[in-house]
Amino acid sequence: YAWDANEEYLFKAMVAFAMRRYSSKSTTQISNVLLCNVTDRVSFWFVVTDSSKNVTTVPGSEVEAAIRMNRNRINSAFLLSDKTLQFLKITSTLSPPVEPSTPVWLIVFGVVLCLIVAGIVFLIVSGIQKHKKQNKESTERENLEEKVEVTLENGIPCEALDLKAGHINGVFAADDERFTSL
Amino acid sequence: VSATPEIPKEDGRPKWDNKFQYILSCIGFAVGLGNVWRFPYLCQIHGGGAFLIPYFIALLFEGIPLLHLELALGQCLKKGSIGAWNTISPYLGGVGVGSWVVSILVSLYYNTVLTWVMWYLINSFQEPLPWSVCPLNENRTGFNEECYESTAVNYFWYRKTLNITPDIAESGTLQWWLILCLAACWAIVYLCTIRGIETTGKAIYVTAIFPYLVLTIFLIQGLTLPGATDGLIYLFTPNLNTLKNPRVWLDAATQIFFSLSLAFGGLIAFASYNPSKNDCEKDAVTVAIVNSMTSLYASIPVFSVLGFKATTAYWDCLDRNIINVINEFDLPEESIMRQNYTSWISFLNSSYPEKIAGLKLKSCDLQEFLDQSVSGTGLAFIVFTQAIILMPGSQAWAILFFIMLFCLGLSSMFGNIEGVFTPLLELQIISKSAPKEILSGVICLISFLIALCFTLGSGSYWIDIFDRYAGSVPLLVIAFFEVIGVVYIYKIKRFSKDVESMTGRKLNLYWQITWRFISPLLLLIVFMAFVTLQMQKPPSYPAWNPKYEGFPMKEEKVYPPWVQAICVLLAALPCVCVPLVAIFQLLKKKHRSKDPSFVPPEVFSCQGANS
């Protein structure tokens, strides 16, 4: 927007408003605020006079304090910010950044750590299970191998042999079986 | 007869699931953080495109031959580094032990760099990014002084992340946030290497491929940024005059050597899990070329972003000057723009020279901003993070970037850990019935406890020391002995036959010449030049000292004598293993030769193992 006499009027009004709020006397009028040296850059000097005390200017520190108190109202009146509307000699009190109660990074870290621990536990447990299964398989296979070996060694099934208490010569038994076909 | 079903581990060694896993693991090991933050820097300071000439010559005569040697060795002997060298010759066992020691030392500090990456990663989930704003000072009238004098990114890196002490002798305290991240990093490494290559083989699909995706995304984004072309032109403009400087050739040779992760024993370990009839020649050439292409590919987005950052800094400089001039002369807004800035300044200078001089305008030169070259952690954590703030959607870019760095580093860690793990498995420190998970757990736990030292205030100074001394000179020495050992002690004729039986082709003349003469000679020259250059300047380090007059410049400090002793120890420890083991074996042989019942071991042959 262009800076014209209306904007100047608004500025005077804002300064008067700031003075009223700060000192809580409702005597400051728009006519008390004087602008001078207005340049195209849009920069100017202004003073606030005190009509009750015979046209003397209000001390600069008071004006500074008043403006500092109402800075955000003045800024928003002009749709500007601390950077774009500069009052020389008035440094703005910076607002601290919003800090959540738990730092965000701790939350993210917690999530990551939980995932990792879950992964490790899963892998270890699956490894133990595989190990157990392998042990079981290998013992089963060993039993199977023994039986196969025994069978192969004699050429005939011998399970019966193992169970009987007596000492039977399996070869003869087998031969008898073969021959007997009456 | 029912045949007993063969368990894959019956012969004691796990195998790769497929060839692609193996190649990807080697590529992941070779492609690491150095490809992203060292190669572009070297390109930039050594005359841009001209640097590629010594780089490719070094690749041809040093990189590929040594890589082929290591892969062939591992594949033929089917053992990790210690076992392999013991088999070649008992006197050369020290070479394997040296590689093993280097792998340990490098694993320790490399994972701490990943800790920093993880810290930045988990901090990237905030709005605004924590390194973009300075914290306020006590009475909230301004910003924290240390932050104000330097920049917000510098402050976040040196204070909030490292909490760095001004001197290496001051250890400071343990930083609890770094300890947490370090624990998480070692837990991730344990998770991925828990059963050796069975688990890393699966993890590598993600960690090796993801960085390429991110690099492509950054490439597309980077090229659209303003000022990207300036950066790229600056990077690639060849300046052939730099080739006259021997320093350039030395840097090219060392970069190729360290970039391919040679002499760590990790490549031997990876290759040892291969089937015998595998074409290791083609593998070596593939891995080396992919590594170099990745370096080149990575430098494009890096330099687009750096060009963007330089341009933005230049514009900021101009804008600040413009504001000052406008305020001084009360000119209307937007009368001076960046384009007509120079004409305005010359006009005002001619009419009001005193006023202009009184303003003390900083001279803004784009070249100057482009010249600010950084490598290493400075590139990733300071320069790049600053550039990311300026991009729209910074959180997403930051997250992508740090995940990429994490993946790059993690895949290199797999190789390092494998170089430690495989020899220990073969030495049978733990009984065969005990699961592998225990061994990898013990390795990760012990490494984590030792690496706690790096989370002290002075930790990053120590990491620089480890990087400079443990991860450089010993590797050159070990590689030299590797080549000499294979070519002259194992005899190259025997090795050629072994390689022929594996690849099915006769050994090329190129390999014969490079293995016999060129590579050892080159390694010797590089080693001498490297050591001479290191000796020339007194070892000093840049310290971050807020009380220094020149702050925010870093203060150059000299290492105290006890630190220098540690540096020498770190460099000498792996190297000294080679002669020590040789002497030990000599003494053992002398002792044994007096024993009449001693039978000399069989001469090993690679073809024998194939049947």
Image: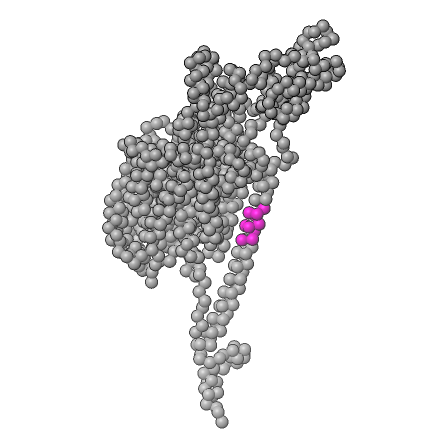
Magenta stretch: dominant secondary structure: helix
Q: Quadrant of the C terminus of chain B?
A: bottom left
Residue lying at 50% horizontally and 65% vertically, measured from the top left: A138
Q: Is residue B409 found inside the magenta-colored segment of the image?
A: no
Magenta stretch? A114-123
Residue lying at 38% horizontally and 38% vertically, measured from the top left: B39
Count of marks, rendered view = 0
Residue A30: image location, x then y, percent: 70, 15
Q: Where is A35 relative to B389, above or below?
A: above
Q: Residue furthest bottom?
A: A182
Residue B597: image location, x then y, percent: 31, 56
Q: Quadrant of the N terminus of chain B?
A: bottom left
Q: Nearer the viewer, residue B50 or B329?
A: B329
Residue B104: image location, x then y, percent: 43, 43
B337 relative to A66 in the view: left or right: left
Q: Nearer the viewer, residue B517 or B316?
A: B316
Rendered image quadrant of residue A80 = top right
Residue lying at 58% horizontally and 37% vertically, measured from the top left: B126
Residue lying at 60% horizontally and 37% vertically, measured from the top left: A104
Residue A85: image location, x then y, percent: 60, 21
